[in-house]
């Protein structure tokens, strides 16, 4: 993963030779290449511009630490600024003081909502919670079936009311959870190929009927800047509490991971790293920065 980006950056940094203070010309040249590498990795152009400016400002004229080569010194600064860019580590679900904690997963079709609803249930079950999965993707019978199959596999109950109104299903699921001792309700909602008013209207409806504690957007890392645009739209319409960035095991160029926080202000809470039920991890900006830099 991120092969292209890390190799490019390493090549660039190798050219920073010598000791003493980092010179403006050297840093500028390196930053030009960092800029290209980040743009090629599909990082948002404004994010790249600000990022490069910050790294440059911190690098020029700095005394290179005795223990580091100039390249290592710049890499250290790039690493620190990447962590800053991706925000704090928040791979946690906020548990409500009065159960059930209600989590609503939203996103475009194919992003990984159903899979991640089940992965979250699995994770929370291992933490001693009693989750309930709720099938609100009523348009595709296959989606309800998919959730039921995953629930059976994980031994997590699944609440569904067929093709009923998603708002009513969501509402009824809370009553059901209260009656059956389930302390976390995870609502899987319908997606569309593109964002449209009908989808947003339906999601707003569910939101107002159950007042979720966490609205998490599921986005596919492979879609790069599109993922960031999708996050921006959903956040402005519904107000997101966090993002689950999926398919990081695939051939992603890393742009979404680096841009989402800076563009939308939303932190990435979890990452999906495979199709299996345990392929979910809390998002760690420091680890991600190390992975990107190779
Ligand atoms: P939904 O339409 O948003 O509910 O998407 P699904 O949960 O049905 O996922 C769409 C496809 O992506 C399925 O084939 C999943 O197995 C796959 N998928 C989901 N998350 C990941 C992930 O983190 N890594 C990989 N490699 N595949 C994933």
Image: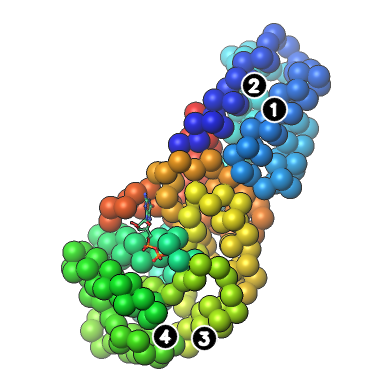
SS at circle 3: helix
Position of residue 73 relative to residue 278, above or below, is: above
Residues at marks 3 and 2, CA–CA distance in whole angstroms = 50 Å
Query: Can see residue 175?
Result: yes
Position of residue 142 relative to residue 13, above or below, is: below
Residues at marks 1 and 4, CA–CA distance in whole angstroms = 49 Å
Q: Which residue is mark 3?
A: 205
Q: Which residue is mark 1?
A: 33
Residue placed most toward the observer, 60 or 50: 50
Residue placed most toward the observer, 53 or 197: 197
Q: Position of residue 228 (x, y in %)?
A: 60, 56
Q: Position of residue 33 (x, y in %)?
A: 69, 27
Q: Which residue is mark 2?
A: 12
SS at circle 2: helix
Residue placed most toward the observer, 188 or 128: 188
The earlier-in-sequence mark between 2 and 1 is: 2
Image quarter of the N terminus: top left
Residue furthest to the top in view is 18
Quadrant of ligand 1 in image: bottom left
SS at circle 1: helix
Residue placed at 47% from the left, 78% from the top? 212
Residue placed most toward the observer, 10 or 137: 137
Q: Is residue 275 left or right of residue 282?
A: left
Residue placed at 42% from the left, 44% from the top? 250
Position of residue 143 relative to residue 244, above or below, is: below
The earlier-in-sequence mark between 2 and 4 is: 2
Residue placed at 34% from the left, 49% from the top? 274
CB within 8 Å, label 2 to label 1: yes
Q: Is residue 76 left or right of residue 189?
A: right
Q: Which residue is mark 4?
A: 166
CB within 8 Å, label 3 to label 4: yes
């Amino acid at each position: 993963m991120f092969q292209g980006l890390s190799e490019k950056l390493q090549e660039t940094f190798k050219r920073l030779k010598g000791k003493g203070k980092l010179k403006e010309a050297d840093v500028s040249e390196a930053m030009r290449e960092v800029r290209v590498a980040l743009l090629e990795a599909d990082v948002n152009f404004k994010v790249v511009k600000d990022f490069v400016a910050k790294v440059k400002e911190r690098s020029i004229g700095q005394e290179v630490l005795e223990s580091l080569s100039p390249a290592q010194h710049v890499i250290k600064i790039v690493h620190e600024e990447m962590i800053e860019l991706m925000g704090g580590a928040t791979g946690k679900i906020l548990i409500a003081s009065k159960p059930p904690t209600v989590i609503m997963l939203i996103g475009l079709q194919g992003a990984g909502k159903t899979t991640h609803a089940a992965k979250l249930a699995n994770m929370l079950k291992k933490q001693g919670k009693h989750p309930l999965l709720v099938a609100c993707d009523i348009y595709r019978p296959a989606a309800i079936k998919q959730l039921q199959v995953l629930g059976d596999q994980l031994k997590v109950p699944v609440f569904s009311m067929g093709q009923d109104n998603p708002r009513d299903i969501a509402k009824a699921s809370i009553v059901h959870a209260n009656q059956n001792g389930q302390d976390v309700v995870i609502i899987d909602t319908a997606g569309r190929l593109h964002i449209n008013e009908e989808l947003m209207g339906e999601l707003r409806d569910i939101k107002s009927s159950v007042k979720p504690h966490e609205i998490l957007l599921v986005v596919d890392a492979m879609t790069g800047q599109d993922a960031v645009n999708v996050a921006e739209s959903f956040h402005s319409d519904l107000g997101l509490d966090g993002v689950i960035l999926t398919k990081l095991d695939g051939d992603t160029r890393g742009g979404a991971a680096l841009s989402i926080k800076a563009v939308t202000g939303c932190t990435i809470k979890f990452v999906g790293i495979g199709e299996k039920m345990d392929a979910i991890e809390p998002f760690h900006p420091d680890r991600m920065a190390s992975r990107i830099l190779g």
